[in-house]
Image: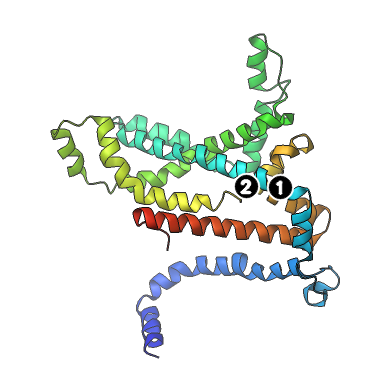
Amino acid sequence: MTKCREFFHGLRRDWQLVLLVLPGVIFYLIYRYLPMYGLIIAFKDYGIYTGIHGSPWAGLKYFQEFFSSGDFFLLFKNTLLIGVYSLLWSFPFPIILAILLNEMRLKSFKKLVQTVTFLPSFLSTVVVCSMVIDFLSPSTGIINTIIKACGGEPIYFMTKPEWFRTIYISSGIWQQTGYNAVIYLAALTSLDASLLEAAEIDGCGRLKKIWYIVLPSLMPIITIMFILNSGNIFKAAQDKMLLLYNPATYSVSDIFSTFTYRKGIVENNYSYSTAVGFFEAMVSLIVVTVTNYVSKKMNDTSLW
């Protein structure tokens, strides 16, 4: 009873903060937690007209069907590779950009660079994918125009499986680097200037100050962002993938999210697609938990 009394007393005392956080809590309750009830479909022979409660139980039927199918290993490999490559290539760029911007002395140029790199994040995924397809068009795309001007043959980038991952990851770097760099720039504002001054007096150059002072000060936020991003290894951007991939690139671009869309929305196999989505979510949870545990053991920084 004492704890409950203290809890409600805290709510009354900090009611302004409660109101501030309330819209976010309501959003996650409605659009994140309540829909989780629908996961029960994965264990039923779901039918639209019978509904969730009227559909008979199927147990682990759809999980067994998925794991024994030839699609499982291909989807797992594609999802893992795209997720790992995206993390390895995309994650360092915002850190590097933030450090470079922080080292700039000309404020006007710094603001210009920050604005230019931040602008792509305002573009919707549809616009970005349309730009990518237009730029890589074999007939009118600027990339193939340059290739033809140099005497080469046009490349059908969007139908070449060997080019798909490069296109997907590089377009993501271009779109998100400026936005993510803001997080690290905000962390750099709390950097103790006296440390940099002391290092400069001791004869440290810029590179040594970055290596021994700036990067260590960023490590807590880098660790947190790495843990958060690791959870997206098995959660590639579904909308972007659907806009860029095609049957010619299924061998490298078909992932859990796109497979779930085709099975559920296109083929109306809701139970099967829910089972695939449930497996994807569980693997993401395991990855985040393991990454958080390792981070906590190594440098005592974690999400929980």
Q: Which residue is situated farthest in the bottom direction here?
A: 1
| Residue that label 1 marks | 73
Q: To which residue does mark 2 refer? A: 237
Q: Is residue 201 left or right of residue 226?
A: left
What secondary structure is found at the residue carrying circle 1? Answer: helix
**Which residue in the rendered view is the most extreme toward the right?**
49
Residue 302, located in which quarter of the rendered image? bottom left
Q: Please provide percent x and percent y for residue 250.
A: 75, 39
Farthest residue to the left: give it.
201
Residue 191 seen: yes
Q: What residue do we see at 79% from left, 70% from top? A: 44
Answer with the quarter of the image where residue 198 lies.
top left
Give neighbour class at mark 2: few <14, some 14-19, many 20+ (Cα, 10 Å). Answer: some
How many numbered markers are drawn? 2
Question: Please, what is the three-letter code of the amino acid marked with disc 2?
Answer: Ala
Residue 158 shows which numbered tag?
A: none
x, y percentage for residue 278? 67, 61
- Towards the viewer: 247 or 73: 73
User: Which residue appears farthest toward the top when viewing the image?
Assistant: 151
Quarter holding the N terminus? bottom left
Q: Amino acid at mark 1?
A: Phe
**Residue shown at 39% from the left, 82% from the top:** 7
Q: Residues within 10 Å of mark 1 (few under 14, many from 20)?
A: few
Q: Mark 1 near mark 2, Cβ–Cβ under 8 Å?
A: no
Residue 245 visible to an observer of this rendering? no
Is residue 169 or residue 134 the one in the foreground?
169
Above or below 158: residue 230:
below
Name the spot of residue 208 as percent of width and height, x first. 25, 33
Q: Please state the horizontal and vertical placement of residue 249, each as a whole percent of the image.
A: 74, 35
CA gap, disc 1 to disc 2? 20 Å
Location of the C terminus (image quadrant): bottom left
Residue 71, relative to residue 116: is it above or below?
A: below
